[in-house]
Amino acid sequence: MSYAPKAARAAALAVVALGAGAASASAAVPAFYNPPASLPSGNGDLIKSQPQPLGASIEIAGVPLWMPGKATKVMYKSTDANGLPVAVTGVYIEPTKKWSGSGARPLVSYAAGTQGQGDACAPSRTLESVVVLEPGQTALGYEIPGIYKFLDRGIAVVITDYVGLGTPDRMHTYVDRKDMGQAVIDAARVALKVPGATVTSSSPVGFYGYSQGGGAAAAAAELAGSYGAGVNLKASFAGAPPANLLDTLKKADGTILTGVLGYAINGLLANNSALKPILDQQTNAAGKAALAKAAEQCIGDSIGSFAFQKTSSWTTSGKSAYDVVNSIPAAKAIAEKQRIGFVKPSKPVMVVTGTQDDIVPHPQAKQMALDWCFRGGSVYYQPVIQPLDTGGTSLNHLAPMLTEMDKAQNWLVDKMKGSTANSSNCLAALVLP
């Protein structure tokens, strides 16, 4: 199997798909992240591993004060949205604490929220150093508190870097439903194969994620019935999931996170090359440059570059990216294929969404929950009432990730312990905001 460096792919994307725009060169990628020439056949097969320090751990005179576990960096085989084998990286963390519940130690496959599209943004990199500072790629491990809370309960955690994030062979496909969901499922598989791991095939598994991670966990919950054989899934938590990309494309435009729309467009183009010449005709020089730049950035850099810009400044027609995509049948069809909610999850899912989320719109997240309910799924829907609009600053988007974290984790842990209480409130979902 041959691979092209991501910088070259970004440049090709800029030049071939979007016209004459130059992508900045990626910073050097650590050798571990380079995939081998050939991959194993099994989904979740371990390709390679190595010990990894945890940057947020604290030890004084050899005494662990906040040492939640032993981390192992992994590369594993998954399958991408086009059905082709792909190497994905991530981290497995074996907790220092014993599991106090009955049965095998549980495992959470943790799907991180938006990190960026540059390789330095990978969650495994920020778990190692907390902060990554490379030219044009500034990343912060903001998911660390949520990960450590599970470890503090004695629950093992595996975190995927997603397809193309960290590995230099391809573009990170960001919110591609299959790429994300299958990477989350295969991360749970590879955890069982990490040397020294105490999780087993009988370990109860939960999927957990917020924002991009909420979409990934939701996609994994849907795909588990067809793709997740052998994974002992008990439940999933999906917070603020971008279940409808068109609605999210419209809502996030002109906000502090306009740059993430560049990630989404780049990712969808990477998996749907036939769209490139079509969108090229709609993208002006500023748009070409924006997409090429976003392809190499982490979220902090993209905020600095694109905060409160409107995508109408990226198009030849002056229309927004939403209007452009919505007007092209082939592009609209591809976006619609990313919809989450059309497949009944095989296990309970908790859905949390802020009623005035200013980035990932509340109505489409609620619709996902209702779609699952109508298909007979077990859905515990929890709206977070937000009386004030925070005007695209992302405050209403991010707040529930923090305020609802304990409730969400408690719910997921209860399900992994076998509780059936509060597994579904579909009737309430019909009348709640």
Image (cartoon, rainbow, N blue to C red):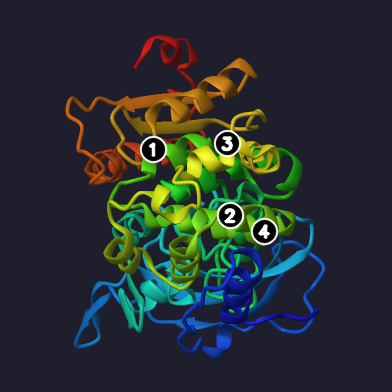
Pick the residue in front: 68 or 132: 132
Q: Which residue is pictured at 48% across the width and 65% down the height?
A: 285
C-alpha separation, residue under disc 1 versus residue under disc 2: 26 Å
Q: Where's residue 348, x and y in %?
A: 54, 30
Quadrant of the drawing holding the N terminus:
bottom right
| 40 left or right of 320 in image | right
Marks 4 and 1, the one that precedes in the sequence: 1
Pick the residue in front: 223 or 116: 116
Q: Which residue is pictured at 40% across the width and 46% down the height?
A: 210
Front label number (1 vs 2): 1
Q: Which residue is mark 2?
A: 184
C-alpha separation, residue under disc 4 versus residue under disc 1: 24 Å
The secondary structure type at the circle numbered 3 is: helix
Q: Which residue is pictured at 59% across the width and 30% down the height?
A: 341
Residue density around tag 4, few if under 14, some if 14–19, many if 20 or more, within 10 Å = many
Q: Which residue is mark 1?
A: 251
Quadrant of the drawing holding the C terminus:
top left
What amino acid type is highlighted by mark number 4? Lys
Q: Where's residue 258, x and y in %?
A: 36, 52
Q: Is residue 234 visible?
A: no
Marks 1 and 2, the one that precedes in the sequence: 2
Front label number (3 vs 1): 3
Determine the image quadrant of residue 31.
bottom right
Front label number (2 vs 3): 3
Q: Which residue is mark 4?
A: 276
The secondary structure type at the circle numbered 4 is: helix
| 2 left or right of 260 in image | right
Q: Which residue is mark 3?
A: 326
